[in-house]
Image: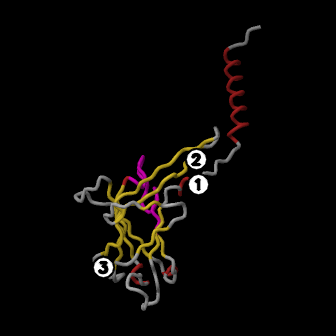
């Protein structure tokens, strides 16, 4: 007895669906790859005005500006800018951090990552009065390497190397998972 084409086709579709649902459809991929390339910075901060000169005061960190320029850097190209404001609820925080990631604080553009840009981090000396920002950190380049690891059902990205070049320094700073780069007041 010969089977008709529609029956064979539907049998193949049902069999394929059953096989896939047994392997991957019920698995939840829990990849933490959204933060894999994250670089964290901490401002050396103190509410005590008698502390060393290279420590930020509360008023220094009310307004932080971050500029992002595509690499290779061209000073004629206008950078994208994000301004971060400390809220009154954050006024007493003694740990002031800045997170740079593929999608924060700037939106990610297709096919570009953190390592496609140069960053300049500044603060305003007398917020909220408008003034000239004081540059505290220039991230000339970020180097990223990673791998895609999968088991047939889930594929996750793992960062294998993260390094930054700052303030025109030719020496690379290798970052390990959990490292936080400290920013001191100029």
Give how far apart the Cα atoms at labels 1 and 2 are. Answer: 8 Å
Of callouts 2 and 3, which one flags the residue occurring earlier in the amino acid sequence?
3
Q: Which residue lies at the image location 71% right of the left edge and 23% below the top edge?
A: 11
Q: Which residue lies at the image location 67% right of the left edge and 20% below the top edge?
A: 9
> Do residues under tags 2 and 3 come within 8 Å of each other at their CB atoms?
no
Asked if the stretch drawn in magenta spans residue 118, the answer is no
In the image: residue 65, left or right of residue 22: left
Closer to the camera, 107 or 99?
A: 99
Residue on which disc 1 sits: 32
How packed mark 2 is, by other alpha carbons closer than 10 Å (few <14, some 14-19, many 20 or more), is: some
Residue on which disc 2 sits: 156
Identify whether 42 is placed above or below 109.
below
Please identify the quadrant where the N terminus is shown: top right
Tell which residue pokes out farthest to the top in this image. 1
Give how far apart the Cα atoms at labels 2 and 3 are. Answer: 44 Å
How packed mark 1 is, by other alpha carbons closer than 10 Å (few <14, some 14-19, many 20 or more), is: few
Q: Position of residue 64 (x, y in %)?
A: 39, 73
Q: Return the mark for residue 130.
A: 3
Of callouts 1 and 2, which one flags the residue occurring earlier in the amino acid sequence?
1
Q: Secondary structure at mark 2?
A: strand
Closer to the camera, 34 or 186?
A: 186
Please identify the quadrant where the C terminus is shown: bottom left
Q: Which image quarter: residue 80?
A: bottom left
In the image, which residues are magenta? 98-115
């Amino acid at each position: 007895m010969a089977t008709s084409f529609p029956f064979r086709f539907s049998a193949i579709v049902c069999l394929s669906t059953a096989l896939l649902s047994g392997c991957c459809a019920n698995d939840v991929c829990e990849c933490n790859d959204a933060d894999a390339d994250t670089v964290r910075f901490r401002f050396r901060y103190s509410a005590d005005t008698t502390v060393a000169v290279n420590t930020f005061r509360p008023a220094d960190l009310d307004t932080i500006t971050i500029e992002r320029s595509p690499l290779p850097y061209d000073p004629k190209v206008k950078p994208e800018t994000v301004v971060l404001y400390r809220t009154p609820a954050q006024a007493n925080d003694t740990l002031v951090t800045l997170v740079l990631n593929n999608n924060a604080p700037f939106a990610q553009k297709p096919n570009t990552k953190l390592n496609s840009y140069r960053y300049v981090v500044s603060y305003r000396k007398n917020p909220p009065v408008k003034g000239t920002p004081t540059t505290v950190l220039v991230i000339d380049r970020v180097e990223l390497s990673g791998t895609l690891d999968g088991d047939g059902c889930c594929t996750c990205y793992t960062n294998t190397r993260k390094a930054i070049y700052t303030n025109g320094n030719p020496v690379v700073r290798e970052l390990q998972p959990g490292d936080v780069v400290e920013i001191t007041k100029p």
